[in-house]
Amino acid sequence: MVFNLPNALTWTRFVLIPLVIGAYYLPLTPSEQNLVATLAFVIAAATDWFDGWLARRLGQTSAFGAFLDPVADKLIVATALVVLVQLERADAIVAVIIIGREITISALREWMAHLGAAKSVAVSFVGKLKTAAQMTAIPLLLYHDPLFGLPVAAIGEVLIWLAAALTLWSMGYYLGKAWPEIKNRAF
């Protein structure tokens, strides 16, 4: 295992996962619980961007980091979605769509890499839109309380449904891009 600053930041996301859940078990007011969970998630999201940037900037990319980064991303998002369903701030169908797509596309990417066709399922613009909607919606739904007069929960709810729609669209896009390889090699 390569230990460097980018990988340490990735590991930070793993450490923050229990805090996103545990915040709601701490003897705090509901608003304080929301704030702790939101801050943990936002810090995790920031490390996701920052670790990749640092790895490229410092020339510290590694196969281990490339493996670990998406695992950390998917776990923090799945954790937050499960918490939001438990708090009745997100519908279970949204969580199933987003988590199910992540598992499906991860498996597809792994298989396509095995076939030597990884570029056919490289990250797309619609995938980036999905991520942006989801990474904006989740902290809004965790925070939940109005902020500066803005209905944070309502905005988060609209964005999480948008993220679910973009999730389905991006899954269709990736499956469509992979279909020629699937058709030629699996059947």
Image (cartoon, rainbow, N blue to C red):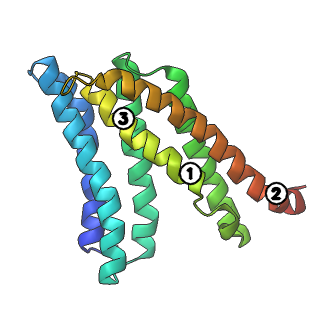
Residue drawn at (51%, 53%) of the image: 128
Question: Which amino acid does the dot numbered 2 rest on?
Answer: Ile
Label 1 or label 2, whichever lies nearer to me, is: 1
Is residue 3 visible in this depiction of the protein? yes
Disc 3: which residue: 138
Alpha-carbon neighbours of circle 2 within 10 Å: few (<14), some, or many (≥20)?
A: some
Disc 1: which residue: 127
Label 2 or label 3, whichever lies nearer to me, is: 3
Q: Position of residue 143 (x, y in %)?
A: 24, 28
Q: Position of residue 49 (x, y in %)?
A: 34, 60
Disc 2: which residue: 182
Q: Position of residue 30 (x, y in %)?
A: 16, 18
Alpha-carbon neighbours of circle 3 within 10 Å: few (<14), some, or many (≥20)?
A: many
Whichever of labels 1 and 3 marks the residue nearer the N terminus, that label is 1
Which image quarter holds the N terminus? Answer: bottom left
Question: Which amino acid does the dot numbered 3 rest on?
Answer: Ile
Q: CA distance from mark 1 to mark 3?
A: 16 Å
Whichever of labels 2 and 3 marks the residue nearer the N terminus, that label is 3
Alpha-carbon neighbours of circle 1 within 10 Å: few (<14), some, or many (≥20)?
A: many
Question: Which amino acid does the dot numbered 1 rest on?
Answer: Gly
Give left or right: position of 19 versus 167.
left
**Residue 50: quadrant of the picture:** bottom left
Which image quarter holds the C terminus? Answer: bottom right
